[in-house]
Image (cartoon, rainbow, N blue to C red):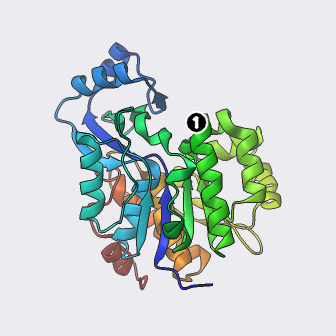
């Protein structure tokens, strides 16, 4: 097996996040379901974009946010995804270049616009995402950069990409390419509604293709259609050898060799915006795994990254995660 060029290669929906502050009355006015990911069409996306006040535009999407976190830890990473040849597509490319992450997928021409997630953050820190998938789900098997996939120690797959058959085919093709090269494949379940839509496919994928699984408690319970967390953990242990399940302020539970490990969350003075918390947890965990750190340390790096990102607006770290890890006594 050739030496990997990257710690992690991410594959997911290439989305520009359009983030603004608002209140519950605004959500009610526009019929937005609070603290959820709501899929919308192009016309609705244009309307809500115009309704956003003083919005921050940044390259996003769950997988890309995780890749940005890995880069902030000092890890090497690349990203694969689809944007259009338009203004927001350039915003995405410029942001990835700025953090030193190669993003070389050819843009979509004469089709849907670049995907965007219009995120409204209320004073309690809840984020309500309104996502237009646009060009991102036009990602096809031909867009899979085989050389890049083969060059990563771990391929990180974003569950949201399962929302279109052609993208699902690309997703599975990329996993097969990674395994054929002797690499590991990881998956984040992304959202409980995503699990509801693709439960059978996810369970089959986890058993056959996934080496490392990320989920939160709600997603895990949805996966197994059960309301008992401990029972769900036991079912998961039968399906995969390594998994990290986040439980908000309760920390996370890691499944590996031996008994499950519970790791506490990092303290946070004030929760400002929970956007990207799970993405950054995965970043810390994957950085730790690719640098041969103990599982408990991997989880702690995940919590350090999550605590940083929920302390400010936006889904990506503002303080270098390398510095925070070192301040916590972890040599990265």
Can residue 257 be seen by looking at this rendering?
A: yes
Q: State the image coordinates of residue 188 (x, y, percent, origin top left).
A: 58, 53
Describe residue 181's horizontal placement relative to residue 316 as left or right.
Answer: right
Name the residue located 57 percent from the left edge and 36 percent from the top edge.
163
Q: Quadrant of residue 316?
A: bottom left
Above or below — where is 40 with respect to 91? above
The residue at which mark 1 appears reads as 164
Residue at the farthest top position: 29
> In this view of the protein, which residue sits in the foreground, 127 or 242?
242
The count of marks equals 1
Name the residue located 41 percent from the left edge and 38 percent from the top edge.
135
Q: Quadrant of residue 223?
A: top right
Can residue 227 be seen by looking at this rendering?
A: no
Name the residue located 57 percent from the left edge and 50 percent from the top edge.
141
> In this view of the protein, which residue sits in the foreground, 167 or 280?
167
> In this view of the protein, which residue sits in the foreground, 109 or 2?
109
Above or below — where is 2 with respect to 187? below
Quick one: SS at disc 1?
loop
């Amino acid at each position: 097996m050739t030496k990997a060029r990257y710690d992690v290669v991410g594959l997911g929906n290439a989305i520009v996040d359009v983030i603004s502050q608002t209140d519950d009355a605004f959500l009610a006015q526009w019929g937005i379901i609070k603290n959820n990911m709501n899929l919308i069409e192009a016309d609705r996306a244009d309307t809500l974009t115009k309704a956003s006040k003083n919005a921050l535009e940044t390259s996003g999407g769950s997988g890309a946010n995780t890749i940005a976190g890995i880069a902030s830890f000092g890890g090497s990473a690349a990203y694969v995804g689809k944007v259009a040849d338009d203004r927001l597509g350039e915003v995405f490319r410029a942001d990835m270049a700025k953090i030193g992450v190669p993003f070389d997928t050819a843009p979509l021409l004469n089709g849907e616009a670049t995907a965007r997630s219009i995120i409204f953050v209320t004073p309690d820190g809840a984020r309500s995402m309104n996502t237009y998938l646009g060009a991102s789900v036009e990602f096809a098997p031909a867009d899979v950069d085989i050389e890049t996939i083969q060059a990563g120690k771990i391929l990180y797959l974003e569950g949201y990409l399962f929302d279109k058959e052609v993208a699902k085919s690309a997703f599975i093709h990329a996993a097969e390419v990674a395994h054929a090269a002797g690499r590991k494949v990881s998956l984040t379940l992304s959202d409980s509604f995503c699990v509801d839509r693709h439960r059978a496919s996810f369970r089959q994928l986890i058993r056959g293709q996934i080496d490392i699984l990320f989920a939160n408690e709600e997603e895990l319970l949805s996966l197994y259609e059960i309301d008992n967390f401990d029972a769900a953990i036991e079912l998961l242990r039968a399906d995969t050898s390594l998994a990290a399940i986040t439980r908000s302020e309760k920390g996370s539970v890691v499944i590996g060799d031996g008994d499950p490990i519970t790791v506490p969350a990092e303290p946070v003075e004030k929760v400002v915006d929970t956007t990207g918390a799970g993405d950054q947890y995965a970043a810390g965990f994957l950085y730790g795994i690719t640098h041969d750190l103990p599982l408990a340390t991997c989880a702690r790096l995940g919590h350090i990254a999550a605590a940083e990102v929920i302390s400010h607006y936006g889904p990506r770290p503002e303080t270098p995660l390398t510095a925070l890890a070192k301040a916590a006594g972890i040599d990265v």
